[in-house]
Image (tube, rainbow, N blue to C red):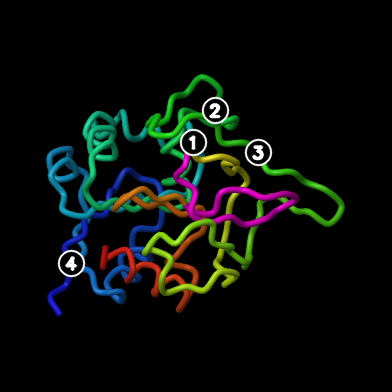
Amino acid sequence: MTPKAVTLVDYGMGNLRSLGRALERAGAQVTVAADPQAILHSERLVIPGQGAFQQAMAHLLERDLLVALRERVAGPRPLLGVCLGLQLFYQGSEEAPGVPGFGLLSGQVELLPVGPELKRPHMGWSPVEHRSDHPVLAANPSGEAFYFVHSYAAHQADGWEVARADHGGPFVAAIAQGLRVATQFHPEKSQDAGERLLAAWLAL
């Protein structure tokens, strides 16, 4: 089978090496790019993310990637956002009041709760429950665990929500519309479960 060409966005946020290796194991031929035209014309695009919302938007602006990314995510071609890469789809985040995201989905990403037995960040394996039959979930049974590392999460998704997890209450674990997908969990850290999900995305 011919590997699928995937462009991995380098904007200084996220572990490109581990995500790139995971994509390659799933059947991708990965190119890392920090050029607006490469991003805009990519066949399949992956937006990684670890860190702060405001810092991510600032890096995208500094590297002249923001306009190209906003146009690319608004289109129908295959797209995958990971962790912070999902949160950037929203209008904004409580983490960075007044800093606009891509605005593909309305609403704000919110700070997760904390309590005596509820730590923040939410870190580790948690079951992910399906909310739709989107084909990106086809290789993973509902309730299978994925690896999370985050302090903020979305709680609604304008009809895009396809999976949900729980940390002191339900939150959006994955969103999808057509070929555009994003996960709050890290597929590249989720071992076999993550590899199967990445392969399903490559097959879309």
Q: Which residue is mark 1?
A: 53
Residue in front for this viewpoint, 173 or 19:
173
Q: Which range of residues does the magenta coloring cover?
A: 159-174
Residue drawn at x 40%, y 50% as measured from the top left: 176
Count of marks, rendered view: 4
Q: Amino acid at mark 3?
A: Leu
Tell me if mark 4 has few (under 14), some (14-19) or many (20+) residues whose alpha carbon lies within 10 angstroms of its own. some
Please state which amino acid type lies under the numbered disc 1: Phe
Residue 183, horizontal then vertical, whole percent:
46, 54
Q: Kindly report the distance in space between the C-alpha atoms of the residues bearing marks 1 and 2.
A: 6 Å
Q: Give the mark toward the camera: 3 or 1.
A: 3
**Circle 3: element type:** strand
Is disc 3 in contact with disc 2, using a CB cutoff of under 8 Å? no
Tell me the residue that label 2 is attached to: 96
Mark 4, residue position: 4
Q: Residues within 10 Å of mark 1 (few under 14, many from 20)?
A: many
Question: Is 192 or 104 nearer to us in this picture?
Answer: 104
Q: Considering the numbered disc 1 on the image, is that residue within a helix, a strand or a loop?
A: helix
Q: Write down the residue under mark 3.
A: 111
In the image, 106: left or right of 196?
right
State which quarter of the image contains the N terminus: bottom left
The image quadrant of residue 134 is bottom left
Q: Point out the frontmost of discs 4 and 1.
A: 4
Q: Position of residue 37 (x, y in %)?
A: 12, 39
Marks 2, 4: nearer the viewer: 4
Residue 10, position as x, y percentages in the image: 29, 48
Give the mark nearer the N terminus: 4 vs 3. 4
Residue at point 58% right, 55% down? 164
